[in-house]
């Protein structure tokens, strides 16, 4: 069997159309059309012999041309001027003509595939060349780590790297490439930067040689610890060396202006930790032990006397803490990959246990904690010592790992869940978190969220109803599986079962929303860091292993101060609906409050949002792991869960709306809104939900159907242009789409399974208007990202042009979520505005930004517009 490798490479044409023209353009063929039968048969015999020879040598292009000419010669034979006297000659070649036609057809199919493959490769090569050209054009003043890594691996560019960190930092860890030399920032000892001064101060021969030959390099890349090019100041060492070798050195002419590695060595190590001589050990500022770092578990009872062995009984290997040193965690020590726990339990020792020290004794009276020791707790994990007094020493507790949320049976006493399997947090040894604080309360079951167009069973006894999410609008709809139809809401409330009292029976509603003790505990649970406060005391979020999609959404929502004030002031408490089957029983909103308070209280530089990640992971398992997720889907999930936890309606029975009963679109829209609000009432609905008008035209009977439906996010397509505007995307969104094939459904008027045209119009804008750009499309089983630059306005925006109910207020941009990379390997960040200035939030790092960055932002993925003026934060008072 002939394989593609055995075939002669394509050399005659670029496609079948060109090859057919070559087959027709032949002098012998033109001569045959004017010849006698004997002359034509002579041409056929010679051409057939050549065709067989070409086929035998796997020259498909030549064989195809010859077989096509043979068939043309046979046609000429039948039309020859003496054909009447040579019918036998025609009959003798009829069978051969069928063979030629079949051969030409087979070769045509093979050649078409080969041409398509060749052209695809050519287009891909052209695209890569253009991408390389665009990349080089983008290299004006700085370069990102990913592009630098690409250049170093391809070795097409001759690059010199200059590391300007201090000598101790360089000796500890530096890039593992011969292209890197070290010129420390203090090499000039306070003198001005000159190229000859640097040469004379260098001592390493290899460094001196490469520095003198700097004119031979295509690019020179300068970097220090973590500096970005846009943050450079005139007196910065990077700027000094750059000016010395580029602007003021007349003897040595560089090929390109020296580039700054954005983010420096820290960003490089974030992306490529293996391309270094040693791990980068984070610099931790040590100081006194902070009060909120001491946690007292609720399950331990104080007694008047402390047994001599009490501490060792509770914590046999606990490490004591020096009074002047904060416990440090060596994050360069990575866990063993794929380490499997036994059954459902795992015991993780904190890093503090590696050293044994004597505890420090400090006298401190603690408030008495209610006795819960009489409660029967079935538990398969490590035992907990009860009825003992806390040691008077402020020792950091040996906290067991956080359990994965467990769903207890109906009407039973809450149980302490088993310890979970370990979560691979990007192979980072993050300390475990107290399981008692975040156990899921007892309720019937949790509604498990699924991605778009996947069903979720509603908790009814016969599983008749299923919850779905619409891919375009993100709205929630109910599938009645018994009658095979969609309904806007559940038909009626099921009778509520009487609740069985569970322990503890303390009425916590009478307590303040936040006390000093609970604030400290929350700060400890989120491992809040107070050192090195960021710009304007903003708080970052640690990446827990591909959790940037979650961090970017949290930051974007937290800058909507109307919503944030509603939570951190405690107003949400009175609206929690623990009986809603679609919610989490209030667990998510309470954890959201804790996270928002720590983000906005301006006391911490960074949080580790593991408690919140575990809480949402209990509802959607995908958010529990470390796989990359879509920020758009997570936003829809979070808003829906917050709404259901705060939904104050009782879902009364309502009749299905019939459009023919309403004379005008406005009457139908108002009726739809009224019906929607009968089943949905929360601050999320009030702020984020708008109304679509859906127009569908049957192409068989031209029947025009109009419906109205609520939406929370608008997903807009992107025009096939290198650059466009938000207006272009919104205009394209309003165009009709054709429903063909599997998208067809039965027309309610003509009862035919017909094709239709459908279009969505914005009828009423929400107060907070969220726009999602459809940057990913499926192509040959792979998602391709659209990198079009979309220009979008930032302030004083009038969206009335796209809304059939004009909004009285203008909109301003509050947040932007950005996506870098591909669908499977990308990174999310966000721009956020507090009403005074813009910030760029990149996980735990936050810096100032300006509108010029937003104007050239090619990575915009979600836009958050608000028609409500930005408010001031109202932090609650904390009683002692």
Image: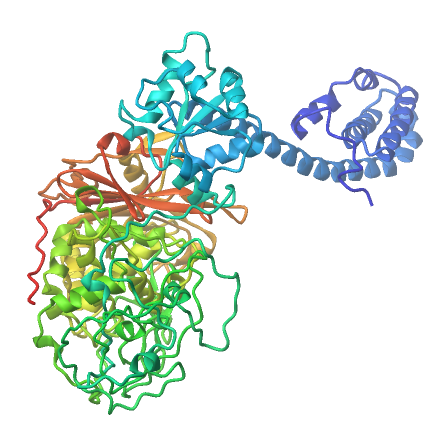
Give x and y (percent) for residue 421. Answer: 44, 71
**Observer-nearest of 726 and 406:** 406
User: Which residue is painted at 27% across and 80% down in the image?
Assistant: 443
User: Which residue is painted at 77% across and 29% down in the image?
Assistant: 68
Give the quarter of the figure containing the N terminus. top right
- Residue 11 to residue 410: above or below: above
* Location of residue 404 (image quadrant): bottom left
Q: Is residue 80 left or right of residue 845?
A: right
**Observer-nearest of 677 and 402:** 402
Q: In this view, does 479 lie to the left or right of 306?
A: right
- Residue 437 to residue 207: above or below: below
Give x and y (percent) for residue 747. Answer: 36, 58
* Location of residue 326 (image quadrant): bottom left
Give the quarter of the figure containing the C terminus. bottom left
User: Which residue is painted at 32% across and 70% down in the image?
Assistant: 358
| Residue 589 appears in the figure | no
């Amino acid at each position: 069997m002939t394989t593609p490798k055995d075939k002669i490479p394509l050399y005659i044409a670029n496609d079948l159309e060109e090859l057919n023209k070559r087959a027709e353009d032949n002098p012998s063929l033109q001569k045959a059309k004017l010849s006698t039968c004997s002359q034509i048969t002579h041409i056929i015999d010679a051409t057939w012999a050549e065709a067989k020879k070409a086929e035998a040598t796997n020259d498909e292009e030549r064989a195809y041309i010859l077989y096509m000419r043979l068939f043309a010669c046979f046609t000429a034979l039948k039309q020859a001027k003496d054909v009447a006297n040579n019918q036998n000659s025609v009959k003798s070649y009829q069978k051969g003509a069928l063979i030629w036609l079949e051969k030409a057809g087979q070769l045509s199919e093979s050649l078409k595939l080969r041409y398509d493959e060749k052209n695809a490769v050519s287009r891909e090569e052209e695209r890569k060349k253009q991408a390389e050209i665009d990349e080089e054009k983008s290299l004006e003043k700085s370069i990102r780590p990913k592009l630098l890594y690409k250049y170093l691996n391809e070795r097409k560019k001759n690059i010199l790297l200059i590391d300007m960190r201090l000598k101790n930092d360089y000796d500890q860890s530096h890039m593992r490439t011969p292209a890197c030399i070290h010129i420390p920032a203090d090499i000039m000892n306070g003198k001005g930067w000159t190229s000859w001064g640097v040469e004379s101060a260098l001592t390493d021969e290899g460094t001196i040689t490469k520095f003198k030959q700097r004119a031979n390099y295509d690019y020179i890349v300068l970097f220090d610890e973590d500096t970005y090019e846009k943050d450079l100041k005139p007196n910065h060492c990077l700027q000094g060396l750059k000016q010395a070798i580029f602007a003021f050195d007349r003897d040595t002419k560089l090929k390109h202006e020296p580039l700054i590695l954005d983010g420096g060595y820290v960003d490089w190590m974030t992306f490529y930790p293996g391309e270094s001589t040693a791990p980068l050990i984070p610099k931790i500022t040590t100081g006194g032990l902070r009060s909120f770092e001491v946690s007292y578990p609720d399950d331990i009872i104080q007694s008047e006397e402390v047994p001599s062995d009490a501490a060792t009984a509770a914590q046999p290997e606990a490490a004591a803490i020096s009074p002047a040193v904060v416990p440090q965690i060596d994050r360069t020590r990575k866990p063993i990959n794929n380490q499997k726990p036994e059954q459902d339990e795992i015991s993780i020792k904190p890093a503090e246990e590696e050293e044994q020290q004597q505890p420090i004794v400090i006298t401190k009276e603690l408030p008495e904690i209610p006795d819960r020791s009489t409660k029967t707790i079935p538990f398969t994990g490590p035992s907990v010592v009860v009825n003992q007094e806390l040691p008077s020493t402020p020792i950091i507790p040996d906290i067991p790992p956080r359990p994965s949320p467990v769903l207890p049976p109906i009407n039973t006493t809450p149980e302490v869940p088993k310890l979970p399997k370990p979560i691979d947090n990007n192979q980072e040894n993050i300390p475990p978190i107290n399981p008692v604080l975040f156990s899921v309360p007892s309720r019937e079951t949790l509604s498990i969220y699924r991605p778009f167009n996947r069903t979720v069973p509603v908790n009814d006894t016969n599983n008749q109803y299923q919850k779905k999410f619409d891919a375009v609008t993100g709205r929630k709809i109910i599938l009645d599986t018994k009658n095979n139809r969609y309904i806007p809401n559940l038909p009626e409330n099921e009778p509520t079962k009487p609740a069985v009292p569970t322990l503890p029976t303390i009425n916590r509603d009478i307590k303040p929303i936040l006390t000093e003790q609970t604030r400290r505990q929350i700060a400890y649970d989120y491992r809040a860091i107070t050192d090195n406060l960021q710009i304007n005391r903003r708080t970052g979020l640690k990446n827990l292993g591909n959790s940037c999609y979650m961090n970017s959404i949290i930051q974007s929502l937290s800058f909507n101060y109307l919503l944030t004030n509603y939570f951190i002031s405690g107003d949400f408490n009175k609206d929690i609906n623990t009986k809603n089957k679609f919610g989490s029983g209030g667990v998510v909103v309470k954890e959201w409050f804790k996270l928002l308070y720590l983000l906005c209280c301006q006391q911490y530089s960074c949080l580790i949002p593991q408690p919140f990640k575990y809480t949402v992971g209990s509802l959607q398992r995908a958010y529990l792991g470390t796989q990359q997720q879509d920020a758009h889907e997570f936003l829809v999930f979070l808003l829906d869960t917050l709404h259901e936890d705060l939904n104050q309606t009782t879902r009364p029975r309502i009749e299905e709306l019939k459009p023919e009963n309403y004379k005008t679109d406005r009457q139908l829209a108002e009726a739809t809104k009224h019906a929607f609000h009968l089943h949905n009432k929360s601050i999320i609905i009030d702020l984020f939900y708008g109304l679509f008008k859906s127009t569908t035209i049957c192409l068989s009977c031209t029947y025009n159907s109009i419906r109205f439906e609520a939406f929370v996010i608008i997903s807009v397509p992107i025009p096939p242009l290198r650059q466009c505007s938000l207006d272009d995307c919104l205009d394209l969104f309003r165009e009709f789409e054709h429903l063909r094939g599997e998208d067809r459904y039965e027309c309610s008027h003509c009862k035919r399974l017909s094709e239709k045209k459908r279009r969505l119009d914005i009828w009423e804008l929400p107060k907070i208007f969220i726009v999602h750009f459809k940057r990913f499309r499926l192509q040959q089983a792979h998602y391709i990202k659209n990198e079009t630059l979309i220009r979008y306005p930032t302030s004083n925006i009038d969206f009335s042009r796209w809304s059939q109910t004009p909004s009285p207020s203008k909109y301003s941009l509050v947040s932007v979520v950005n996506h870098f990379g591909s669908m499977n390997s990308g990174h999310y960040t966000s721009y956020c505005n507090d009403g005074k200035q813009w910030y760029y939030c990149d996980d735990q790092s936050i810096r100032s930004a300006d509108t010029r960055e937003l104007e050239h932002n090619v990575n915009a993925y979600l836009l958050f517009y608000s028609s409500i003026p930005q408010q001031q934060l109202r932090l609650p008072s904390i009683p002692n």
